[in-house]
Amino acid sequence: MVKAVDTNVPHAAQTGAGNTSTEDLQRQVEMLKSDISKLTESLGDYGRTKGREAQAEARRRADELRSEAQAKYDDVESYVRENPAQALGIAAGIGLLIGMLSRR
């Protein structure tokens, strides 16, 4: 990670650090660039992983909803086959209601 920069100027001067602190700063900047690059890569990997997880969850939920819809369709179809006159009356009533509402 990033090392702390020596801000003690007299100490830096004693160690002949005019160039050394510049070199340290350059080294720290390079380390920071490397750390940022690694962090960016890690965030990209994390985002891709979460995206794949969300996609898998969406597919699972879509399959579940598709199964539920098919089950409801099968129930309605079965009801219509068992009670055709009643189903026809219900359908006519719904059609009449929709027709009345659409005229307004």
Image (spheres, rainbow, N blue to C red):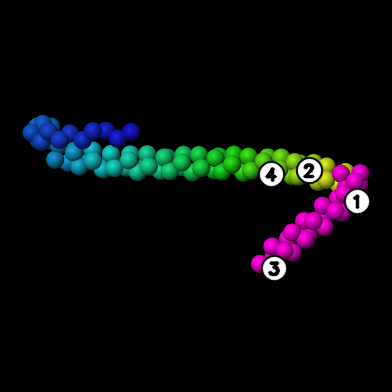
Could you tell me residue 15's position as x and y percent?
13, 32
Q: Name the amino acid type tagged 2.
A: Lys
Q: Secondary structure at mark 3?
A: helix
Give amino acid for label 3.
Arg
Q: Residue at x 23, y 41 (%)?
A: 25
Q: Residue tagged by mark 2? A: 72
Residue 31's x, y, as percent?
33, 39
Q: Amino acid type of disc 1? A: Ala
Which badge, 3 or 4, comes first in the chain's sequence?
4
Measure the C-alpha gap from mark 1 to mark 2: 20 Å
Q: Mark 4 or 2, which is nearer the eye?
A: 2
The kind of residue tagged 4 is Ala
Q: Which residue is mark 4?
A: 62
- Which residue is under mark 3? 103
The dot on residue 69 is: none
As measured in the structure, the alpha-carbon distance from the residue carrying label 4 to the one carrying label 2 is 15 Å
Q: Which residue is mark 1?
A: 85
